[in-house]
Amino acid sequence: MYNLAICYKNENNLEKAFYWRQKVAEGKLNFESKDESCNECQKPYIDYQWCQKCNSKRFKQNFLKWTSKNEFIDKFIQEAQLNAKNCYEVLEWIPYDKFLNVNYYDKGGFSEIYKAVWLDGPIDSWNFDKQQWNRWKYQTGYEVVFKILNNSSILNNKFLDEWKYHYNCQKKSFSKFIQIFGITQDPYNLNYIIVMSYAKKGNLRKCLSNIIKFKWLDKLQLLKNIISGLKVIHESNLTHGDFHDGNVLLSDDYNEVFIIDLGLCKPISDKKDNECYGVLPYMAPEILKNKPYTPASDIYSFSMIMWEFTSGIPPYNNKPHDYHLYIDICKGERPEIIENTPQCYIDLMKRCWDSDPENRPTVTELEYKMSEWIRCTNEFYRVNRNGFYNCRVSDIDIKLENDMLEFVKENNALVQEQANITITQPHSQAYYTSRKLTEILVKEDSGCLECIVENY
C-alpha cells in the first residue's frame, strides 16, 4: 500500500501524488509498507494507514459536533464516513469559514461554479501522535471547486440522487470521476454547495484546440479513458443522461479524464419523464423523439466526442441549435467526416451514431477496440522506431494490422493539417450547456415530439 506522503516524496507534485495514490486505491498498483497494522486495534489495514473499524468509530464520535441542518445530507455524509474503506471514500460537512478566496469560475447549464481554497484540505490518514486527521494541502491551502445547488436551502433526498450516483461511481473508479470531498452551505443565501477537486485543464471542450494536434495514439488513450469512465456508469446499471464534452474534465498532463455532472443520471429501469434536457448536438435521435434513455443513448453522445477529436470543434457549431437541427438529427444528419480520418475509426464512429440504438456498440466493445488499437500501435512504434513499416507486429490478425496501419499512415497528415486550422467562432445560437429543450422543440409544432418525425 502507498500513502500520499510517499507519492509526494517521489513526485514532488501534489496532483501527481494524488494520481498514483488513486491507482493504489483502485488496486491497479501495489506497494509494500512496513506499517500494515493499526496501532490501536492491531488489525491489518485495509488500505494504507486506514483501519475502517477504528476510523468509523472516530467519525461516529464526532457526529454530534456537526450538522448540515438537513437530515438527508447528514445521513449521506455519515453513511459515507462509517463505510469508507480508504481516504477517497470520506465525505465531510465542511464549515463555510474553512474556505478562502471564493471566486466565480464558470457557469453550467443549471448551476454556477466557483473556485476556492480549502484551508484544511482533504483527509489522508489518522495521526496517532497528535490524535487528529492528517490532511493534505499546500502551504496556502488546497484548491477546490464549488458547485452551487441553487434553490437548495430546503433539499430532499431525491435532490441528492445525482451526488449519490456520482459518489458510488467515484468509489468504483477514483481516477475516472472528479472527487467529491463533501458539502458546505453559503451562510448568506443558505444554498448548499458540493465541494469537489479542481481539474486544472478544465473541460474537454476547452482543450480541443490542443487535442486536435495530438498523435493518434494519444487521442485513442484519451478516448479509452473516457469510455472506461462511462463503462463504470453503465455497469452500475445507470445511464449518464447528459454526456458531452463539457462534462468531461482533464488532468493537468492529460493522462486522466474525470466525468462530472451526473445530474440526469438515473437507473436504467427508470422511465423517461416528459421533460427534455441536454445539449442538442449530443442528444440521440430516440431521445429527441421522446423515447426512453438507454446506455446506447450515451454511446451516441460519445460518437460526437470521437468526431471532435478529428475536427477540433464541437459538432454543429456553425448552425443554430434549434427546431431545424432537431429535425435534421432525427432524419439522420450527422457531422461531416473530416479528411485524413482513419477509415476504421470512421466505421466505429458511424456505428456509435447509428439512428438505431440496437446497432450501436456497448462500452465493453468500445473499450476493447480502443485497447487493441492502442496496444498494436504502441507495438508498431516499438519495432519500427523510425515510423516506417520495416517489421511486422506479431500476434495480431490482418484486420487489426490494417487498422493499426491506418492510424500510422494518417497520423502525420492529420496532425499537420489540423495544426494549421483556425478555430472559427460558433454560431450565435449554438448552445453547449445543458438546457431545457422541450419548449424549443415543440414551439413550431403543437404535436408531440414523437409524432413530428414519426415517418422520417
Image: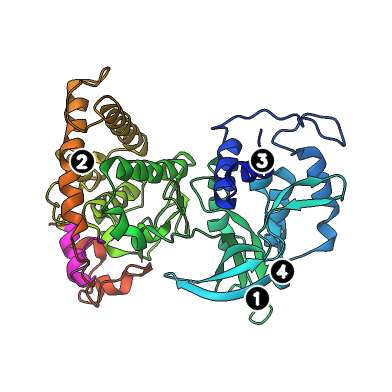
- SS for dot 3: helix
- The 10 Å Cα crowd at callout 2, few under 14, some 14 to 19, many 20 or more, is some
- SS for dot 1: loop
Residue where numbered disc 3 is placed: 6
Which residue: 54% across, 32% down?
A: 28
> Image height check: is 38 above or below 328?
above
Residue where numbered disc 4 is placed: 98
Q: For marks 3 and 2, give the CA distance.
A: 41 Å
> Image height check: is 88 above or below 400?
below
Q: Amino acid at mark 2?
A: Tyr
> Which badge, 2 or 4, comes first in the chain's sequence?
4
> Which badge, 1 or 4, comes first in the chain's sequence?
4
Q: Nearer the viewer, residue 396 or 337?
A: 396
Q: Amino acid at mark 1?
A: Asp
Residue range of the region highlighted in magenta in the rendering: 313-330
> Image height check: is 290 above or below 220?
below
> Which badge, 3 or 2, comes first in the chain's sequence?
3
Q: Are marks 2 and 4 in contact (CB under 8 Å)?
A: no
Q: Nearer the viewer, residue 7 or 351?
A: 7
Residue 352: horizontal and vertical position, in percent? Answer: 25, 44
Verify whether residue 329 appears in magenta: yes
Residue 167: horizontal and vertical position, in percent? Answer: 58, 50
> Image height check: is 358 above or below 404?
below
Residue where numbered disc 2 is placed: 345
Q: Amino acid at mark 4?
A: Lys
Question: Would residue 112 appear left or right of 68 to someone viewing this image?
Answer: left
Which-is-in-front pick, marks 3 and 2? 3
Q: Amino acid at mark 3?
A: Ile
Q: Are marks 3 and 2 in contact (CB under 8 Å)?
A: no
Question: Would residue 131 appear left or right of 103 to someone viewing this image?
Answer: right
